[in-house]
Image (cartoon, rainbow, N blue to C red):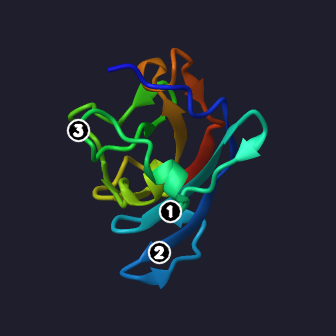
Amino acid sequence: MGFEKVLDQFNRTKVAHMSLQGQAYTADTVAVGVKVHLDTTPALNGVEYPGYSEVVRSWKKEDGTSPRIEWRWGSGQKEFSNSGNDPFHLGSYEDDGGCTPALRLTRQLGDGRTEVWAEPFIRAEYNGGLEVVGRRVTFYCD
């Protein structure tokens, strides 16, 4: 099954907000249990498609459920996502076509403050042969 090209860039990739047990979390460093809510806006030929749009929600992989937009995250050169040793739980991934996932820290990362990065991407096989990687955003965890 061939997939058409649906995007050529990600705009405004950011940490939208943080929460703990449904309440706003405003500390500078993410603690265990805190959710980091991410957000990005895909675009094609300068036209942006917000994640809540039916257009973006229709961009699915072969299974008909998984969004074509994916995320990866890590610290330094180490990628946590799909590592088998991921200190985060990915939630809300299928909402908004993969544009607004939440990462919840499930265990402490190490001693002290650790910089963590996250970036959206779409694999070439799901985008007409063009891989697109969005800007990395960073935040700090305990």
* Amino acid, disc 3: Asp
Question: Quick one: quadrant of the N terminus?
Answer: top left
Q: Which residue is mark 2?
A: 19
Q: Is residue 102 above or below residue 71?
A: below
Which label belongs to residue 25?
Answer: none
Q: Are marks 2 and 1 in contact (CB under 8 Å)?
A: yes
Q: Secondary structure at mark 1?
A: strand
Q: Position of residue 33 (x, y in %)?
A: 34, 68
- In the image, what residue occupies the spot 57% across and 72% down? 27
* Amino acid, disc 1: His
Q: Which residue is mark 1?
A: 37
Q: Earlier in the sequence, mark 2 or mark 1?
A: 2
Q: Which residue is mark 3?
A: 63
Question: Quick one: quadrant of the C terminus?
Answer: bottom left
Q: Is residue 56 visible?
A: yes
- In the image, what residue occupies the spot 41% across and 77% down? 20
- Which quadrant of the view contains residue 71? top left
Q: Residues within 10 Å of mark 3 (few under 14, many from 20)?
A: few
